[in-house]
Image (spheres, rainbow, N blue to C red):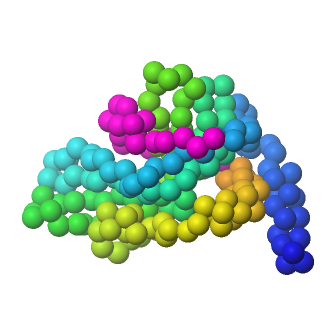
Amino acid sequence: MQRLRPLLLSAILMAGCATGIGGAEDRKISTSMVLIVLDRPFFYYGTVDATGQSSRYALVKGTYQPLYEDAKGTYFIGPGHCLGIEDVSAKAGAVEKSKAHRCGIYVPSLSDSSPQVYYYPHQQVLVDGNIGQAVANSIPNISPIAAGLGAGIAEGIVAGIAASQAAEFRFFEHQPPADALRQAISYLR
């Protein structure tokens, strides 16, 4: 408990300093207790361009926590670098390059609107090999109690850091087909 005290104080301090989000006056830190879960990796494909190259996009399986909310919906932040992007060449399906971005899912309040993927374009990592394999193996199986405890402690830290970088994220240019993502999401209350 002695080691946990400084961490908790830091989380409270960071959350308290996370006010005044530049360029996001209509967003506020979410008070929602609802989590969204992708039980398996979610894949979708982009269009083929003039060079014969297409893209495959993947959202990692795992729990997406509420981060911000506005008048139209809630922003859920995903685990780690949760948006995988893989460019595939027309030549025998060879993978050209793969990268992963920090991301999340925006869920509109209106039930007839589709969820949207948002990402942090300046927070990416290069991925060796097939993004599908990296995404499938990205989240280890851990006990729900350990996951809940870790999420509770990290919530203040993640919210504070993400709030300070809120102006950096934007909606992804290549959204999944209408309602495909909604069908893949389950809700935990």
Q: How many marks?
A: 0
- Asked if residue 166 lies left or right of residue 93, the reply is right
Q: In the rendered image, which quarter contains the C terminus?
A: top right
Residue range corresponding to the magenta coloring: 166-189
Residue 162, magenta (yes or no): no
Q: Position of residue 25 (x, y in %)?
A: 73, 34
Seen at 50% across and 23% down, the residue is: 111
Seen at 39% across and 37% down, the residue is: 183
Q: Position of residue 52 (x, y in %)?
A: 14, 53
Residue 182, magenta (yes or no): yes
Seen at 49% across and 42% down, the residue is: 186
Instruction: Please determine whether, in this image, residue 127 is positioned above or below residue 174.
Output: below
Q: Is residue 43 visible?
A: yes
Q: Nearer the viewer, residue 109 or 37?
A: 37
Q: Position of residue 34 (x, y in %)?
A: 64, 41
- Asked if residue 154 lies left or right of residue 78, the reply is right
Q: Position of residue 188 (x, y in %)?
A: 58, 43
Instruction: Please determine whether, in this image, residue 146 is positioned above or below residue 39.
Output: below
* Farthest-out residue, bottom: 3
- Asked if residue 36 lies left or right of residue 137, the reply is right
Seen at 23% across and 44% down, the residue is: 47
